Amino acid sequence: MLKRVLIANRGEIAVRVIRACRELGVETVAVYSTADENALHAQLATKALCIGPARAADSYLNQDALLSAALASGCDAVHPGYGFLSENPEFADRCAAAGLKFIGPSGGVIRRLGSKSAARTLACQAGAPVVPGSDGPVKSARQARELAGQVGYPVLLKASAGGGGRGMRQVDRPEGCKEAFAAAQAEAVACFGNGEMYLEKLIVNPRHIEFQIMGDSQGNVVHLGERDCSIQRRRQKLVEESPSVALDSRLREAMGAAAVAVAKAAGYVGAGTVEFVLSPDGAFYFIEMNTRIQVEHPVTELVTGIDLVKEQLRVAAGLPLSFTQEQVRPCGHAIECRINAEDPGQDFRPCPGRTEFLHIPGGPGVRVDTALYPGYEVSPYYDSLVAKVLVHAPTRLEAIRRMRRALEELVIEGYPTNANLAHLIMYDPEFVKGQYHTGFLDTHLERLLELARTCDRLTEEEEG
Ligand code: ADP
């Protein structure tokens, strides 16, 4: 097994990795920026090293500082978490060159899948259905317009290097191509330093269905079932669940097989996620593969009983997966709500601040992954995700009821969060019936926010 792991991340995912390491008897080295001196991950690790100033570019993205910290503290591996350098092929290569095991796929594999347009080609070769669209990159607005005419409007212009819904524009008419291409490309250059674009037909009202994959260095690749992540705001996930009500066993098998085929074609080792859109007519299409542990991985852990982070560590140490495809037997239903320090009433503006009061829900079937503690100062420098509230129950309806009560127990004071919005979603008739698609939240947001305002006003009146 590994001896000592440097965790090149912060927040709840750093804490999550430390927990897995401790249970396996693996030592941990946390790194922190000056803004994170009092952060939980720095306190829970075996050892903690300051790697630079608050700005991520100077600390959590500083490859030199991370590599020196890992080597100076005698680590034999680096866990990148999600975000930051987790999908940076150069960092994976540099870890390997320094004799450190990068806990994830090799730089070569990350490169192969990191360009979404190249990943599309790979998925095609692996026999997985892809959304009709361009063969490789689209060079100009004019070429985009030509291609869009062939596949039919509406289309999506997407950045090959894109992520988090950025560098993406919907185009409904030929006249819109020029402006959308320029805007999407400019955003891609600004966010990812890479303006390569490609084009896909827009699947109308799809569900976002993703499959969790694990591969080992012996060549085994298995999938651990799906997560339905269709509750999104501007293409960012807010609620995830497994299993998806939209899949029957035949469709699950077909999509799982396609996901495994893509991962095998890429020579995949470690934890990864193959993402699809599922059209209302039952057709599914590959959209991308994420080469890291995902925010929503605990949803899969709850239904399968498999600890994905421990499995990542095993695989990085060269051990085979501890289970076969047949041994993956999902059980019950799990839901995750992402709790962000943000104000849904003000266009989801991030709202960092001091955690004045905190109560974390508990009881049967509840799991909360967070790095919060009372008095903790949420920093404006990083992601606004402060907690992930998860529930597991025998049926979907029981899971929904459990999530309602868990969110009722949750108290975070000091800054606004989206917890009320998540709670209202758990009461929405369409959500409860499972009849939703990726447009759900954008369509219902105003109504839900109005409901939230009314609830707040009534509470205030009652208390006042
Ligand atoms: P990112 O890496 O920026 O998250 P993705 O390619 O994963 O980008 O897409 C993000 C979201 O956009 C998906 O979850 C889905 O809701 C939507 N989406 C992406 N491609 C399509 C498509 N071709 N048709 C319809 N929706 C899509």
Image (spheres, rainbow, N blue to C red):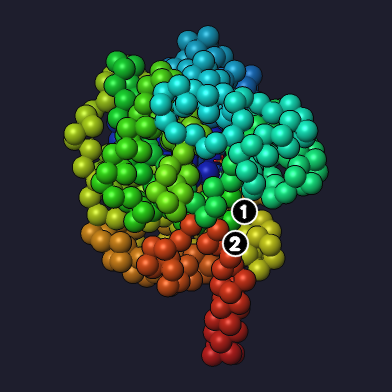
Q: Is mark 1 within 8 Å of ligand 1?
A: no
Residue 37: where, in percent of width, then height? Answer: 60, 41
Quarter-of-image position of residue 263: top left
Residue 324 seen in this snapshot = yes
Q: Are marks 2 and 1 in contact (CB under 8 Å)?
A: yes
Asked if residue 419 lies left or right of residue 329, the reply is: right
Residue at the image position 80 percent from the left and 40 percent from the top: 178
Instruction: Name the foreground residue: 119 vs 106.
Output: 119
Tag of residue 234: 1
Residue 96: where, in percent of width, then height? Answer: 50, 12
**Element on which disc 1 rests:** loop
Residue at the image position 39 percent from the left and 49 percent from the top: 282
Instruction: Name the foreground residue: 405 vs 198.
Output: 198
Q: Is mark 2 within 8 Å of ligand 1?
A: no
The residue type indicated by label 1 comes to Arg
Residue 18: where, in percent of width, then height? Answer: 41, 36
**Element on which disc 2 rests:** helix
Q: Name the N-terminal-most of marks 2 and 1.
A: 1
Residue 397: where, in percent of width, then height? Answer: 30, 66
The residue type indicated by label 2 comes to Asp
Tag of residue 442: 2
Q: Residues within 10 Å of mark 2 (few under 14, many from 20)?
A: few
Residue at the image position 42 percent from the left and 51 percent from the top: 281
- The N terminus is located in which quarter? top left
- The C terminus is located in which quarter? bottom right
Ligand 1 sits in quadrant: top right
Asked if residue 275 is positioned above or below residue 2 in the image, the reply reads below
